[in-house]
Structure formats: structure tokens, C-alpha cells
Amino acid sequence: MSPFFLLFVAFGLFPLLYTGWASLHQVELTAPTDMDWVGLRNYTRIFDDDFFWNAAKNTLTIGIISTVPQLLMAMGIAHILNYKLRASTFFRVAMLAPYATSIAAASLVFVLLFGRDYGMINWVLDMVGINPVDWQNDKWPSQIAVSSIIIWRWTGYNALIYLAAMQAIPQDLYESAALDGANRWQQFIHVTLPSLRPTILFTCVVSTIGASQVFGEPLLFDANKGTSGGAEHQFQTLGLYLYEQGWVAQHLGRASAIAWTMFLMLIVIGIVNYVISRRLRASS
């Protein structure tokens, strides 16, 4: 077991602690070894920064727009795949294809789909009488477009997790429900969903953590604007804001403070997950 712990200390624990130490100093990328102690000034400074709160709100809205439809679709797909289908193995492998696809390749394809002048999405909207949408420069359309990339990439992954959990449910429960006159929809509501509560909680937490760290999709959706997340920062996430402060503005101390703020947010999410899971186990 020692190789794992040695690698974890070298590439996990040490960078985490060093980032925490750097967040208490003024450090520039041009001179990373020159540190001036500033205490909590980096934290108070980012909390007074409108761009930080804008990025936090964008991260929240993109997380909601992408996570809720993603998990609902994953549940529906898993429920369909749970029944005996022809070529079921093919469909299960196909569900993982988006997850195995490069973020860069997927994002570039979606950029073409959501193009303002020649994109397929606007072409379809024009066919039904809807004016073209500027997907990259308008706030809500751009966030919906970025969320669609996340939904496409992670729905199949979560569907397979739900499918594995569904196959672990004893068939006796479904047979008893059928004998009591329950149809398939009633079996899904009263048997499948209660049995999947721990798995649903797990996917919600993992998807929330993933949504808080979104970086590649918004970065590549409008490569011309880079880490700014659009002309007016309309889809800049916390991940982009962190990268912008650390590697574009070259303020490593401030970027370290943002990283630790995000880390503390994830700890809060983990605590909430622990409390909810304990209550679910106590009620079951």
C-alpha cells in the first residue's frame, strides 16, 4: 500500500497544504518563491469581488440546469435498459461513449451545433418560426448550451450507475407488488425509487461536486474569450475564474484562496451528504 500513499502525499496532500499556505501570501506567477504574508486578505478580497460572485452564481445555475435533467434522463434510460431488450449490451456500451469522448472534441462539435449563423440548432429553430439565438453571447442561452454539453457527456455514466443499482433490487419485491395489483409505474414509484435512495443521493453529490468544478466545457465553448467565460463573463464558472486569476492575471495567492474556498464548499457538500445519508438509514 505504500506506493499509493507516497504518490498521494507527493501529488495530493502536499499541493493541497502548499496551496493553503500560498493563499495566505501575496504570490505572483512571475516569482512563485517570493511570498509576502497578507493573512486573510486574499479571502476578503475575493469575497468583495463582483466577478467571484458572478462566477459562483454561474456555477450554481449551470449546475442546476445540467444536473437535474441529467439525473432524470439517466433514471429513465436505466429503467428502460433494466428490462430485457434486444442488443442490450450494445445500448449499455453506447451509454458510455459520450463519457469516453474527449471534452475538447465534444465541445467543438457543440460549438458548431450552437453556432449563431450556421448552427444546426438555430436552423431547426428557424424551421419552426423561432428567430436565431445568439448562444455564445446571451446569458441564459450560453449557460443552457454549456449545460447541454455536460448533460450529453454524463447522462449515460449515471444511467449505468442506476442500472447496476436496479439490477441489485430483489425480484421478490416486484413479484409481491405485482400480486398486489401494482402496474409498472406503481412498481417504479413504490419499489424502485425507495430502493435507489442511497444511489440517487450518491449521484446527486457526485454531480454537484462535478458541477462545482466545471472547466473544460465553458472554456472551449467560446475559445476566443478564453477564461473570461464570454464577453460579459456570462458563463464564467469558478474553475475558469480560478484559472484566470492564477495563470492569466498571475496572482497565485488569490487563485490559491479561490481554490481553498471551493475546497471548503465541497466539504460542506460532503457534510450535508453525510447527514442526509444517516437520516435515510435511520428511517429505513
Image (spheres, helix red, strand yellow):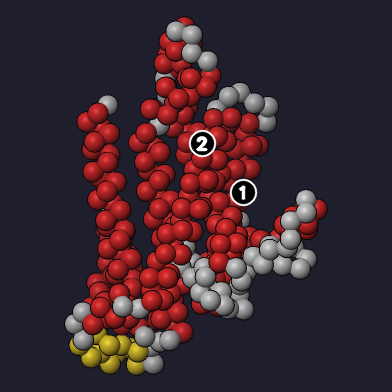
In the structure shown, which secondary structural element does the residue marked by tag 2 occupy?
A: helix
Residue 67: x, y in percent? 48, 50
Q: Residue furthest top?
A: 179
Q: Is residue 188 above or below residue 279?
A: above
Residue at left offset 59%, top offset 51%: 152
User: Observer-nearest residue: 132 or 148?
Assistant: 132
197 in relation to 189, above or below: below
Residue of label 2? 75
On the image, the x and y values in percent for residue 261 come to 30, 68
For the question of whether residue 100 can be seen, the reply is no
Residue type at numbered disc 1? Ala
Q: Of residues 10 and 265, which is closer to you in this image?
A: 265
Task: Say above or below: 64 vs 39.
Answer: above
Residue 94: give x, y in percent of width and height. Answer: 63, 43
Residue lying at the far right of the rendered structure: 127
Point out which mark residue 97 bears.
1
* Lower position in the chain sequence, tag 2 or tag 1: 2
Query: Where's residue 65, x and y in %?
Result: 50, 53
Location of the C terminus by quadrant is top left
Residue at the spot 35% in from the left edge and 83% down from the top edge = 252
Q: Secondary structure at mark 1?
A: helix
| Residue at the spot 63% in from the left edge and 60% down from the top edge | 106
- Callout 2, which amino acid? Met
Q: Residues within 10 Å of mark 1 (few under 14, many from 20)?
A: some
> Closest to the observer: 83 or 181?
181
Mark sitting on residue 229: none
